[in-house]
């Protein structure tokens, strides 16, 4: 059972998410917060497995709350759910230690899918996140000698939002092999997690 903390300053949004998850036996909403300060406090108190976090909130926004939570909890999964599409919001969120970024106009089925993917240990980013960054970043060249052709291929697929299982199926290799390549890529590029891999790919015009 995945314990979820909902963080949004609009009660109607929290109620909508609870209603959508009512039929999902693998998820249980254990708490609600209306700002980042409450989110930090409830994370310490309730120890959720997954946090659904808005960005634009009073007192403390979702990005700052994520940074505070990461100081004492590296394991909880954090999914940003927001209306904000501006580049600086996306970049700030990516650098704060989130595990996913989706938009409030996302369909409920895709939203639940994002929760399931994140709860299983994969990161999830809406394809629009990649497009937003692509449109706002200057093109630069990747250092070709850092990664093998297979690693470069896998990095591109990661940046497109594919899971290890999906990448394995696409390349006809096992998900375990994909995960080994992912670890090697992270090590070679001196990065930390999928969010930074996505950011690196965008900055180096890989997608």
Image (cartoon, grey):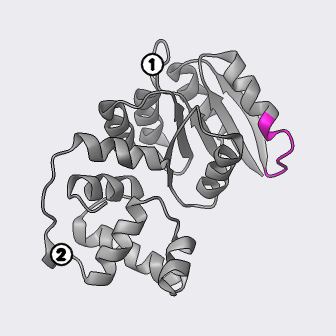
Q: Which residue is mark 1?
A: 60
Q: Please name the residue shown 40% across and 35% down the image.
A: 67
Question: Which quadrant would residue 12 be assigned to in this image?
Answer: top right
Q: Please name the residue shown 60% across and 23% down the image.
A: 8
Of the pair 42 and 142, the residue shown nearer to us: 142
The image position of residue 168, as x and y in percent, is 52, 79
The image position of residue 73, as x and y in percent, is 50, 44
Tell me, yes or no, whether the highlighted magenta stretch contains residue 22.
yes
Badge 2 element: helix
Tell me, yes or no, whether the highlighted magenta stretch contains residue 96.
no
Furthest-top residue in this view? 58
Comparing marks 1 and 2, which lies closer to the viewer?
Answer: 2
The magenta region covers 20-26
Q: Please name the residue shown 33% across and 35% down the image.
A: 92
The image position of residue 21, as x and y in percent, is 79, 40
**Left or right of 202, for residue 114:** right
User: CA–CA distance between discs 1 and 2?
Assistant: 39 Å
**Left or right of 187, for residue 174:** right
**Left or right of 120, for residue 193:** left
Reply above or below: 155 against 97.
below
Mark 2 Cα shell of 10 Å, populated few (<14), some (14-19), many (≥20): few
Q: Which residue is mark 2?
A: 146
- Residue 123 has which mark? none
Badge 1 element: loop
Indicate which disc, 1 or 2, sits on the residue closer to the N terminus: 1
């Amino acid at each position: 059972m995945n314990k979820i903390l909902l963080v949004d300053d609009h009660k109607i949004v929290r109620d909508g998410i609870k209603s959508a998850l009512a039929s999902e036996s693998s998820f249980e909403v254990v708490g609600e917060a209306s700002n980042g300060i409450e989110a930090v406090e409830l994370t310490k108190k309730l120890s959720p497995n997954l946090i659904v976090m808005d960005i634009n909130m009073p007192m403390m926004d979702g990005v700052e709350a994520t940074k505070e939570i990461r100081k004492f909890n590296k394991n909880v999964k954090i999914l940003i759910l927001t209306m904000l599409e501006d580049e600086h919001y996306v970049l700030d969120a990516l650098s704060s230690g989130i595990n996913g970024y989706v938009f409030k106009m996302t369909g409920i089925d895709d939203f639940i899918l994002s929760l399931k993917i994140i709860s299983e240990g994969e990161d999830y980013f809406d394809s629009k996140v990649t497009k937003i960054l692509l449109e706002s970043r200057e093109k630069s060249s990747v250092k070709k000698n850092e990664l093998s052709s297979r690693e470069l291929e896998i990095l591109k697929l990661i940046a497109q939002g594919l899971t290890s299982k999906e990448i394995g199926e696409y390349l006809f290799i096992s998900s375990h092999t994909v995960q080994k390549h992912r670890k090697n890529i992270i090590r070679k590029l001196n990065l930390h997690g999928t969010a930074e891999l996505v950011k690196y790919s965008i900055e180096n015009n890989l997608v």
